[in-house]
Amino acid sequence: MNDFQTIDRRVRLVDMDTPRGRINMDSLILHPLTLSWASIKHCRNIIFEDHGYLTWTAMTATTKLRNSLLAILVALLVGRWLIYSIGKAFGLYLKRKTAARRQSTLKRVRIEEEAVRSFYRRSQKSEDDDWEKIESYGAATSTNGSLADSDWEGIVGFFHPFWFVGLIYTRSKCLLIKSDSNAGGGGERVLWAAIRATQKRWPKAVCVVYTGDHDATKPSILERVKVMSRSFDGRDSAHRADSMMQNRFNIQLHPPTVVFIYLSTRDWVLSSKYPHFTLLGQSFGSLILGYDAFSLLVPDIFIDTMGYAFTLALCKFFFPEIPTGAYVHYPTISTDMLGSLDAESGRGLNAGLGKGWKGTLKRWYWHFFAWMYCWVGGTVDVVMTNSTWTQGHIRSLWGPNRRKRNKSSNIEVVFPPVAVEELEQAIEISESSEARREKALLYVAQFRPEKNHVLILRAFSQLLQSNLGDAAKATQDVKLVLVGSVRDDEDKRRVYSLRLLAYELKIKDQVEFICDAPWSDILDWLRRSWVGVNGMWNEHFGIGVVEYQAAGLISVVNDSGGPKEDIVVDWDGGPTGKLHNLEMRGAS
């Protein structure tokens, strides 16, 4: 009775006939929800003692609001259930579609594995110690200290669609002679280290790598990973030419349980395909690439090692029961990026671009994308980052949504593997070797805009011009060596413009450009150089800086990102390098 305007009046309700039958008004009072389902719109009057008439519009705003909210809640629940059901249905379809490939893949792996075992049994050589290490992986223990389930024979999928172009997002140098190849980078090294860890814990598991490089065969890829990779006809692929051996990672792998699945839709994630709204375009393009991967083979565990977080959300949409993991090299968007649009305090390539109506739209677009990025990050089960700086940003972006979804695992820092031992063996550090070093400033980085080669050139020019008189003798023979890879025509034009800038600054005789240098040449420059520089703002980790230090160079880096928080830090009360708060506007 409180749902009607009955102040100081007694209400006499009259039963009414409707096209759907007779409605008892007393039942409506007792069960107000029936007002939404009965044909109450056909009710014409409710009679009061004072002979006034009250129509449907007499219902209070509270009841209308309650019914509206109820309808919205029901719609949301039904919609969520419907979306969940559609995802499960697609997932079931993909599992059935790829069941035959799954079985054939597992069968082929077992055949290859038996062939390798037979070969090693026949060889009976002491050099098979590495193989014995792989054999002993069954004794590995899980993270909680209990014995790992070494008999698990599932499939672990690693989403790594790029060997070459893709590594431009995760590496600061080129290690191969070919101009189109950045193999040997930090992102690829992380992949092989993850596969090795998987083989140690689950020796019978199959590691599937989703890649888009159709011209890269399994033998050619594994050849540079570790000398242990062998062909099955008895020929040892490890003892090839020294030029090939220089490109290996020195990571022990068991080749038979490594399988490559080749994707055909990689063009959807190329930045050149999206001249506008690049972040959004590449992210939605990764959904197409991810569907391509799942339509070929559905794994039991899915791991992304290249920053395609949207594919992990797609995996959860299709297969809620499959665990997902992400190794984040660099957040696709960060709070620093959002702040860089400010005209006064902005830094980086987008400094000051938030002005005007275009800047306002860009800011809205970035905030919208950041909201989407936060949402997809909340779906990931296990998250690792490559540095403390990356961890802080991922926690601020993904943390709230992960807590809402009750993700129990923390976002941990796992530093990327660096060839420190190899550098220590290849480069002598002693008083005599230090005396042989040249006055060379070395910058090893791909020729990309964010690497700030322009800034380095201008800073080097100022260094030469600021030293006059006696101080000029100290910089008389100093030179700047820029070593990096050239990916495409755009990079070639960028290198040409850098050469022009060096000419304009009148330092062309003191600057040397080395494009697409092999690892042996990079080692030589690390051995000869005096100072290692890094001009990138908010470098995610800085593998090159670690290699500077391992080679005995003095590190002079930007006062930001991973180098600041994890690498160029005080040790035993002394500095390990020099941090500079450089002005970024000149590099944009």
Image: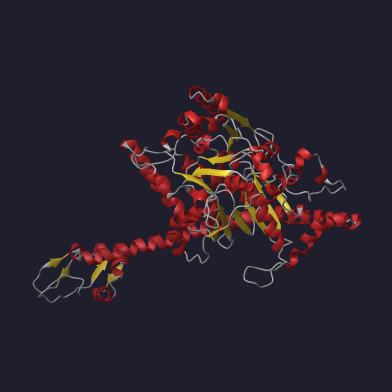
Tell me residue 85's x, y (percent).
51, 60
- Residue at image point 58% right, 55% down: 415
Would you say 62 lies left or right of 423 here?
left
Q: Residue furthest front?
A: 470
Tell me residue 533's x, y (percent).
54, 40
Q: Is residue 209 visible?
A: yes
The residue closer to the viewer here, 373 or 74, is: 373
Q: Is residue 484 above or below residue 330?
A: above
The residue closer to the viewer here, 390 or 113, is: 390
Tell me residue 400's x, y (percent).
43, 60
Quadrant including the N terminus: bottom left
The residue closer to the viewer here, 456 or 448, is: 456
The residue closer to the viewer here, 584 or 133, is: 584
Would you say 26 lies left or right of 185 here?
left
Quadrant including the C terminus: top left
Q: Is residue 464 visible?
A: no
- Label count reads 0
Q: Image quadrant of residue 198?
A: bottom right
Tell me residue 24's x, y (percent).
26, 74
